[in-house]
Amino acid sequence: MLTIINSFFLNLCILFTLFTISFLPFRNHPRLTPKSPLKGRILLGVQTGVVALILLANALPLEGILIDLRSIPISLAVLFGGWVSGAVAGIIFLIGRFFMITDGEYVGFYLAVLTMTSLVVPTSLLRLKLDNTRNTLLVFTTISVGVFGSALYYALPLELLYPILFVYTIMAYVGACAAYRLLHELRRHFENVQHQQQLARTDALTGIANRRLLNEAMANLNVEAKEYALILVDIDHFKRVNDTYGHDVGDDVLRELGMLLVAESEERHLVGRFGGEEFLIIMPNANRDEVTRLAESIREKVSTFPFETSAGTLHITVSLGACHSNDIEVDSVLKHADEALYHAKESGRNRFILAS
């Protein structure tokens, strides 16, 4: 009895360790579902199939069959990836099981084919109707206990069947619940880390990139882009808005301007709040004509845009200064853009100047 418990406990330890290790490379990827891209579901099937094979390599050999907790990774494959992941995992497991046949003993392999088919098919059908929850996994575990219990009844004498089936049932339910909780907690932990990283790079008021993220992006420009441009955008007479209507209204203007700049810019551009009422647009792989078109488009759009605030509709203008890189350092590009912005302010505001 102690040998049986030790064998299953070893399987559980291997299972948790492998799940943790295999999860890490995909911690930043979206959660897998039966509707996820096919490549991801196949990869999940490969992973879980390999985990099942490693469990098989550490299985308890009795009467020509190998007893292990292979049902847990296979059930999890179906739970997260649907029938595709389950089928891939099952096939990989059976291929490995075939090469483990010794002395012409095919009984164990035939039982493995039968039990794997009897597990994957009904769980895949049920997954079409059931959600990705722990209760669904418990239903799958109940099926696996029935399937493997039937196989054990066929292959083992009764004096071995009862203790093994008893321990297997307990370990299967405990292992399934613990594995599900482990994956759930890992996913929640890394999503929380991602959220904190996003907050660290996002301006709290406008929801766009903050100064830190802008600086990181500019530091990589000389390496990633042959040519690029920086556009500084500054609200004209913003202090007058704050003094007249209050800082809450000023915040409304900043938020709406941030969204407008993002809407006017392309996806490859990075728009962020550079400080106060000043915004920065980073344009990788952009020529001078593109810079002029975008800046003038923003200037014209802002001048006619109705900014809805808590004090009513306001109209503002912005001044813009930009510099296009011709193999010069980003610090110099930013300095020239700032000088161009200064000249735009000095020459009457609501203007765009591109540094020469």
Image (tube, rainbow, N blue to C red):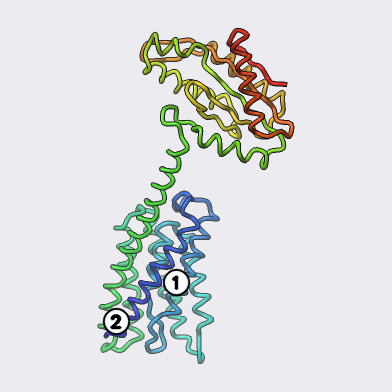
Q: Residue at x 26, y 72 (%)?
A: 170
Q: Residue at x 34, y 84 (%)?
A: 154
Circle 1/circle 2 CB separation < 8 Å: no
Q: Residue at x 30, y 62 (%)?
A: 138
For the C terminus, which image quadrant?
Answer: top right
Looking at marks 1 and 2 on the same chain, the residue that comes earlier in the sequence is marked by 1
19 in relation to 114, above or below: above
Query: Where is residue 191 shown, x and y percent of the image?
Result: 41, 48
Residue 302 position by quadrant = top right
Give the residue type at disc 2. Ile
Q: Which mark is residue 52?
A: 1
225 in relation to 82, above or below: above
Q: Is residue 270 left or right of residue 160?
A: right
Q: Which mark is residue 164?
A: 2
56 in relation to 276, above or below: below
268 in relation to 39, above or below: above
For the N terminus, which image quadrant?
Answer: bottom left
